[in-house]
Image: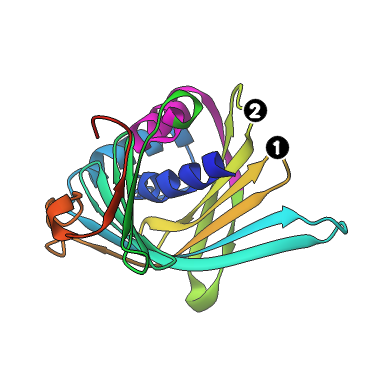
């Protein structure tokens, strides 16, 4: 469950790297994703408000849902996630969680299996270790056309496939669904997406001095 949580957090950052500039449902999806990565890096900063639903099998055979919402601010490859009353700084393989309610800071270093879920590792994994195919399209509210791309990771024991929805009017992400091999489905929907709003690198970088008196729990040397 902890690994799934980190994968979900990293996915929010990876979504900020996928803003497609496609014109039609043709060509190679992977080629388009590579073009997207290059285009999106030109943004100074990105702010994404989202809703998230995790659906898992229950003991009685019925599906159990957990719903939440939050905001992620991205500058370069660093991000600040506001989720469930916590501030989560995602900086490469370092994840720092700040709980203002508990006045506690917990630092984790992602290594081993968890290291593959850092934003950079996820992007590379999907680029080089996945099969891509078109997964249809639909028209939603206000006549907005959504085009779907299915990504099937190779040799991944946790993820069966991923479906990425693209809003063709804004050329931005509409939704992300991850289907786990354990029958857990994670659905992310973008509620609002703003770019170049003046978010600074300092804001998304953890600074311990901003939290005097907080308990600090971290691996040695961090």
Q: Main secondary structure of the magenta part?
A: helix
Q: CA distance from mark 2 to mark 1?
A: 7 Å
Q: Tag count in the figure?
A: 2
Q: Height in image: 146 above or below 159?
A: below
Graded by Cα atoms within 10 Å as few (under 14), some (14 to 19) or many (20 or more), the crowding at tag 1 reads: few
Residue at mark 1:
181
Say whether residue 1 is left or right of residue 198: right
**SS for dot 1:** loop
Q: Is residue 197 visible?
A: yes
| Cβ atoms under marks 2 and 1 closer than 8 Å | yes
Q: Which residues are magenta?
A: 115-135
Say whether residue 94 is left or right of residue 148: left
The residue nearer to you, when weighing 33 against 4, is 4
Report the quarter where the C terminus lies. Answer: top left
Q: Position of residue 41 (x, y in %)?
A: 21, 43
Residue at mark 2:
157
The residue nearer to you, when weighing 9 against 165, is 9
Q: Quadrant of residue 98?
A: bottom left
Q: Position of residue 43 (x, y in %)?
A: 18, 51
Of labels 2 and 1, earlier in sequence is 2
Q: Position of residue 108 (x, y in %)?
A: 37, 39
Q: Position of residue 15 (x, y in %)?
A: 39, 49
Does the magenta segment cover residue 131?
Answer: yes
Graded by Cα atoms within 10 Å as few (under 14), some (14 to 19) or many (20 or more), the crowding at tag 2 reads: few
Q: Quadrant of residue 199?
A: bottom left
Report the quarter where the N terminus lies. Answer: top right
């Amino acid at each position: 469950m902890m690994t799934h949580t980190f994968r979900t957090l990293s996915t929010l950052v990876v979504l900020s790297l996928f803003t497609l500039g496609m014109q039609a449902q043709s060509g190679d999806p992977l080629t388009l994703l590579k073009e997207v990565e290059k285009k999106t890096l030109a943004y100074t900063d990105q702010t994404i408000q989202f809703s998230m639903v995790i659906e898992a099998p229950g003991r009685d055979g019925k599906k159990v849902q957990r719903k939440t919402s939050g905001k992620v601010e991205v500058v370069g490859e660093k991000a600040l996630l506001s989720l469930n009353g916590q501030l989560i700084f995602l900086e490469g393989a370092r994840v720092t969680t700040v709980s203002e309610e508990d006045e506690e800071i917990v630092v984790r270093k992602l290594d081993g299996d968890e290291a593959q879920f850092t934003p950079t590792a996820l992007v590379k994994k999907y680029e080089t270790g996945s099969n891509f195919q078109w997964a249809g399209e639909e028209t939603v509210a206000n006549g907005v056309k959504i085009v779907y791309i299915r990504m099937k990771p190779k040799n991944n024991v946790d993820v069966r496939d991923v479906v990425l929805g693209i809003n063709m009017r804004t050329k931005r992400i509409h939704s992300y669904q991850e289907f786990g091999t354990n029958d857990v489905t994670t659905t992310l929907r973008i509620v609002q997406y703003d770019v170049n709003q003046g978010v600074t690198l300092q804001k998304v970088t953890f600074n311990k001095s901003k939290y005097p008196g907080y308990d600090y729990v971290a691996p040695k040397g961090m």
